[in-house]
Image: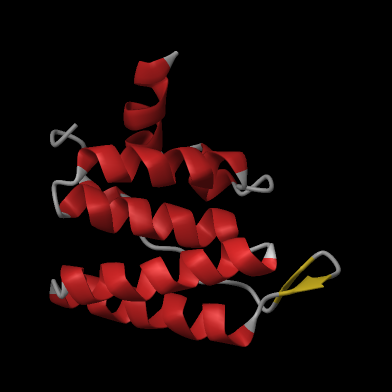
Amino acid sequence: MSSISLLAEELIRLPRTEASKSFDMEINNLNNIGIKQFPTNKLDSAEESLRKATKLAEQLRDPSLGSTSFNRAIILHRLHKSKDALKYFNLAKRYARGNLRILNSKLLKSYTDKIK
């Protein structure tokens, strides 16, 4: 899995709305913090922010769950936590809501295609 270039895998910012649903502001803020920490290699801090965002998205059944899970999975992959990354790539795929950046991700496919 480490042979996949992460340069092509960028974290996803949340839009203000998706269809008729609005994203929770706290989830958006936590997601943005994780995105800002990612390029500075503050991966543990980024993962913590995205952990909180994902947990909140699950609790609120927020439409951001796919994106926050995807972002968290990328960070976990970079931290060499493959088992955890797989869990969140699967969650991202399940809640992608048609987001092609998630569904077409080579890194996501490298994890999820192995369990077929």
Can see residue 62? Answer: no
Give me the residue at 25% from left, 53% from top.
Answer: 76
Horizontal relation, residue 22 to residue 66: left or right: right
Horizontal relation, residue 59 to residue 77: left or right: right
Give me the residue at 57% from left, 71% from top.
Answer: 14
Horizontal relation, residue 15 to residue 8: left or right: right
**Residue 34 placement: quadrant:** bottom left
In front here: 80 or 16? 80
In front here: 24 or 109? 24
In front here: 67 or 52? 52
**Residue 35 placement: quadrant:** bottom left
Q: Residue 106 appears at what percent x and percent y?
A: 36, 35
Task: Please tell me whether residue 66 is drawn above or below residue 33 in the rendered image.
Answer: above
Task: Please tell me whether residue 46 is drawn above or below residue 4 in the rendered image.
Answer: below
Can see residue 28? Answer: yes
Give me the residue at 61% from left, 47% from top.
Answer: 96
Q: Residue 60 appears at what percent x and percent y?
A: 67, 69
Q: Residue 38 appears at what percent x and percent y?
A: 24, 71
Q: How many marks?
A: 0
Q: Quadrant of the N terminus?
A: top left
Residue that lies at the very extreme toward the top in this rendered image: 116
Residue that lies at the very extreme toward the front in this rendered image: 59
Give me the residue at 44% from left, 75% from top.
Answer: 31
